[in-house]
Amino acid sequence: MRRVPEPRELADLPYAHRLEPFGGELERERSYEWVHVDGREFDEVDGGSAHFTESALSSVTFTRGRYRRTLFDGVWLHHLRAVGSDFAESRWLDVECGAGLLAGAEIHGAEMRRVVFHHCKFDSVNLRVAALREVDFVDCLLRDVDFGGATLTDVSFPGTTLERVDFARAKLSRVDLRGAVSLGIRSVEALKGAVISSPQLFDLAPALAQHVGLTVRDTD
């Protein structure tokens, strides 16, 4: 099993000494490097195609914003709230997100690589046709999350609760579900390429039997 990085504090970041407070407004197609966005609320902002590099966002709220094709590269996110915002086709590279909330967020078609979510809540999040590689959901809650048609490679869910999560037509490779607290999964036929534990297999047995048309009957 791949080792999951431990959560870090702001001061632990290798670029912490370079960070400068950010007091402006987010704009489309702007590059933001070594900025610390702290305690800000962005309502219905269009920041599409912006680039954040080696930056930190703490206690930041995005509400009904448009951030398509935004790049987060080497970014630390803490207490992030993204409600009803559009991050479709965004790129997340070497990102750490702790204690975040993503609700009603559109992240379809996104690319995530070497990303770890610690103690985050995903509620009604659209991750269809996204590409996730080396992504860890640690002690998270995923409720009504749609991975339909997505590609997941080297993804793990230690300590995470999955409720009504949809993997329909997803492509899974080395997806480790053994550490998940519960597997509330739709489209169990799409779990080819995942690893589960023996107790989880028993939990999934009714859904698997239904999928293959198997009738389980102990008595006449």
Image (spheres, grey):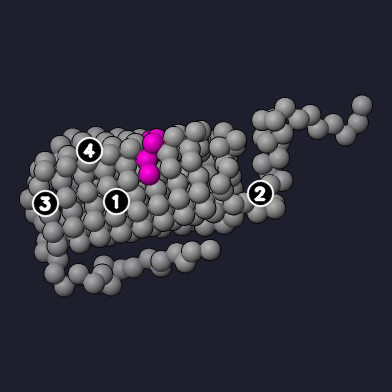
Nearest the eye: 188 or 151: 151
Mark before the other along the chain sequence, 1 or 2: 1
- Is residue 12 depicted above or below 104 in this figure? below
Q: Are marks 1 and 4 in contact (CB under 8 Å)?
A: no
Q: Residue at x 56, y 48 (%)?
A: 194
The alpha-carbon separation of the residues under discs 4 and 2 comes to 37 Å
Where residue 199 appears, as percent x and y from the top left, is 70, 52
Q: Amino acid at mark 1?
A: Trp
Magenta range is: 125-131
Q: Find residue 68 and name its label.
A: 4
Q: Amino acid at mark 4?
A: Arg
Q: Secondary structure at mark 1?
A: strand
The alpha-carbon separation of the residues under discs 1 and 4 comes to 12 Å
The alpha-carbon separation of the residues under discs 2 and 3 comes to 45 Å
Where residue 196 appears, as percent x and y from the top left, is 62, 51
Nearest the eye: 116 or 112: 112
Residue 144 visible to an observer of this rendering: no
Q: Find residue 92 and name its label.
A: 1
Q: Residue at x 34, y 68 (%)?
A: 8
Nearest the eye: 15 or 150: 150
Q: Which residue is mark 2?
A: 200
Mark before the other along the chain sequence, 4 or 2: 4
The alpha-carbon separation of the residues under discs 1 and 2 comes to 30 Å
Q: Which residue is mark 3?
A: 31
Mark before the other along the chain sequence, 1 or 4: 4
Residue 8 visible to an observer of this rendering: yes
Q: Find residue 124 and name its label.
A: none
Horizontally, residue 98 falls left or right of residue 48, namely right
Instruction: Specify the quadrant of the image occupied by residue 69.
Output: top left
